[in-house]
């Protein structure tokens, strides 16, 4: 039996991902823009396993969450580049 897709907001844009997908996958579907470095360079997931911290986003108001390590949940609100 297939699980229902999960709907969440990425910077106010509704995104639907398969159940079990991580937040990084949802962000990639929405825009590929995660955050910028202190020098203004675009950053995105590098390792995909929570070591590099390049995929940090704010999730439901909590800053510096690793998108690659967080499963997408229904109604989750994600903000990139915070």
Image (cartoon, rainbow, N blue to C red):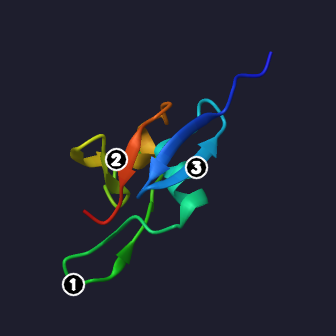
Q: How crowded is mark 2: few (under 14 residues within 10 Å), some or many (20 or more)?
A: many
36 horizontally vs 10: left or right: left
Q: Callout 1: helix, strand or loop? A: loop
Residue ID for mark 2: 66
Q: Residues within 10 Å of mark 3 (few under 14, many from 20)?
A: some
Q: In the depicted view, which residue is nearer to us: 53 or 72?
A: 72
Label 2 and label 1: CA atoms lie apart by: 20 Å
Q: Callout 3: helix, strand or loop? A: strand
42 horizontally vs 48: left or right: left
Contact flag, marks 1 and 3 (Cβ < 8 Å): no
The quadrant of the image that shows the N terminus is top right
Q: Quadrant of residue 60?
A: top left
Q: Earlier in the sequence, mark 3 or mark 2?
A: 3
Q: Callout 2: helix, strand or loop? A: strand
Q: Residue 18 at what x, y percent from top left? A: 66, 36
Q: Is residue 56 above or below residue 31?
A: above
Contact flag, marks 2 and 1 (Cβ < 8 Å): no
Residue ID for mark 3: 15
Q: Which residue occupies 52% across, 67% down?
A: 32
Query: Which is closer to the viewer, label 1 or label 3?
Result: 3
Label 1 and label 3: CA atoms lie apart by: 29 Å
Residue ID for mark 1: 39
Q: Earlier in the sequence, mark 2 or mark 1?
A: 1
The quadrant of the image that shows the C terminus is bottom left
Q: Residue 55 at what x, y percent from top left? A: 38, 57
């Amino acid at each position: 039996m297939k699980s229902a897709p999960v709907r969440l907001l990425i910077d106010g844009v509704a995104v639907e991902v398969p159940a079990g997908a991580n937040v990084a996958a949802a962000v990639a579907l929405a825009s590929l823009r995660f955050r910028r470095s202190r020098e203004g360079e675009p950053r995105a997931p590098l390792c995909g396993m929570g070591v590099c911290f390049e995929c940090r986003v704010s999730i439901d108001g909590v800053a510096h969450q690793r998108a690659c390590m967080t499963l997408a949940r229904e109604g989750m609100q994600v903000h990139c580049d915070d």
